[in-house]
Each structure stands twice: as C-alpha cells, then as structure tokens.
Amino acid sequence: MRVSVIIPTHNEAQAIGRVLADLPPDLVTEVIVVDSNSNDGTPEIAADNGARVVQEPRRGYGRACLTGLAKTNSPDIVVFLDGDYSDRPSELPILLGPIIQGHADITLGSRLRQQRIPAALPWHQAFGNRLAAGLIRFLYGPKISDLGPFRAGRADVLRALELEETTYGWAVEMILKGTLAGFRVVEVPVSYYPRIGKSKISGTLKGTAGAAWFILSLIVRYYFRHRSAVTRPPV
C-alpha cells in the first residue's frame, strides 16, 4: 500500500530531524512537511532528511493538514503526525495495522490508554481530551479516549468526508464525520513523550483555551446539525 505521511510544522528545528529519521522506510511512500512560516531552519532540515516541504503561510492546524492532504501523490493511506517528537513515528505499524488488516477505515493513536511518561501530557490537556472524547462517546458512540494528533485514514475515506476545518477543530471533524457516515473509527494505544520545544497549544493559556473552544463547540454543533438533518421532513 502507498502510505503518505503529513507533518505540520512551525519552528520544530530541534525535533523534525528525529521525527523523520524514525519513520519506518519500508512502510512510508512519501513524507510531506507542511511548514507555516518557520524561521529556525525547520524546512531546510526537513528537506535534507528527504521530506517534500510545502509552504502554507496561512495559519491554522487544520489548514496545514488539509494542504498536505491536497499535495499527496495517490496514496492508499494517509498518516498525520506532529513534528515535535512527542509521538513515536516508529510506532507507525500499530497505527496502520487495523486499516491494512481491513478492520478500520480511520485509526486514532490514544495517548491515554497506556502508561505514559509523567508530564508528557499536561494535566489540563489530558483532562480536556478526556472531556471531549467522553462527549463524543456520549453523543456519537465511537469508543475513543483521546483526540491525539497521531492518526491515519484510508485516502478514499478522507476524500469522501470532505474535511474543511482549518482550526484545531480539525482534530474532531474527521472523527465526527467519519462516524456519522458509517465508517469504522478504531483507537489504538500509542506511547507519548514530552515534546521537544515549547507547545503552541498547551504551552500557553490562550492556545489551550482556543483549542478547547473550537473542539467542544464543533462537537455540539455537528450533533445538532445532524439531528436537524435527520428530523427534517422531506420536501
């Protein structure tokens, strides 16, 4: 299978080389680093390590992921991975396994289902992820515990979902649309480590609050939008 890996970056010079070096070469067909105005040499390091670098000057985590998705070269599976080395790219087989075996259409790497390094995930971020995942389980049904960035999906499924969120709400859009469309969303446990460098989300109050707002409001908005569509009488 052709596997494309998309890595959004912004000033990840300390980590991106290690991320790219840890990707299993026998599984990965192409690596696309979508860089947003880095000024620390991240794009150059990524290119030197064999990645195709795409510049996306517009802000937004979801926008970077969507830009990378649009630049892929006919993959069967697309993987999304952060560039801070908190997730381990060497665990890619864990993420791809359910899809390759035909048991899943989308897989999510959960950072909360097994022992993790202390302080790797700040308490408020872990709490927020558990809250959002619990709300998704209650309203939509999929058995998930986390909204981790290490995830994969069949390329044809991702195209069918017509993903469009450009903010941190992108983290849940794939799950919600996939579930509502009847695709199999499966969670697998992955390890998680303290990131290299400062987080753009959990490292600041503004980033944490902004991400929480986009995620929780999107979960509720999609739920009522779906209910309205289901109960609307035919014309």
Image (cartoon, rainbow, N blue to C red):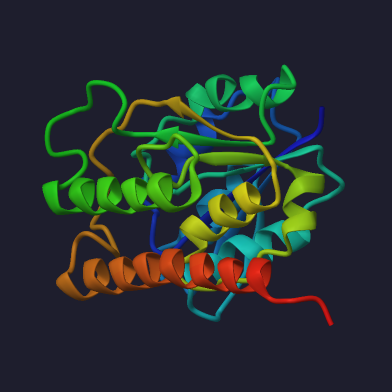
* Front residue of 17 and 189: 189
| Location of residue 100 (image quadrant) | top right
Residue in front for this viewpoint, 137 or 8? 137
- Whole-percent x, y for residue 16 in the image: 45, 46
84 vs 74, left or right, is left
Work out which residue is located at the far front of the displayed protein and give it.
233
At x 34%, y 39%, the residue is: 86
Report the residue at 38% width, 48% height from top.
138
Examine the rendered structure and indicate whether residue 54 appears above or below residue 102: below
Position in image of residue 7 (x %, y %): 55, 51
Residue at 55% from the left image edge and 81% from the top image edge: 58
Q: Of 235 and 154, which appears nearest the observer? A: 235
Q: Position of residue 215 (x, y in %)?
A: 39, 65
The N terminus, quarter of image:
top right
Residue 26: image quadrant is top right
Against 197, is 66 above or below?
below
Could you tell me which quadrant the C terminus lies in? Answer: bottom right
Q: Is residue 218 above or below residue 110?
A: below
Asked if residue 162 lies left or right of residue 53, the reply is right
The percent position of residue 170, horizontal first and vertical second, equals 51, 63
Vertical arrangement, residue 190 with respect to residue 29, above or below: above
Give the camera-side residue of 172 and 235: 235
Report which quarter residue 40 is drawn in.
bottom left
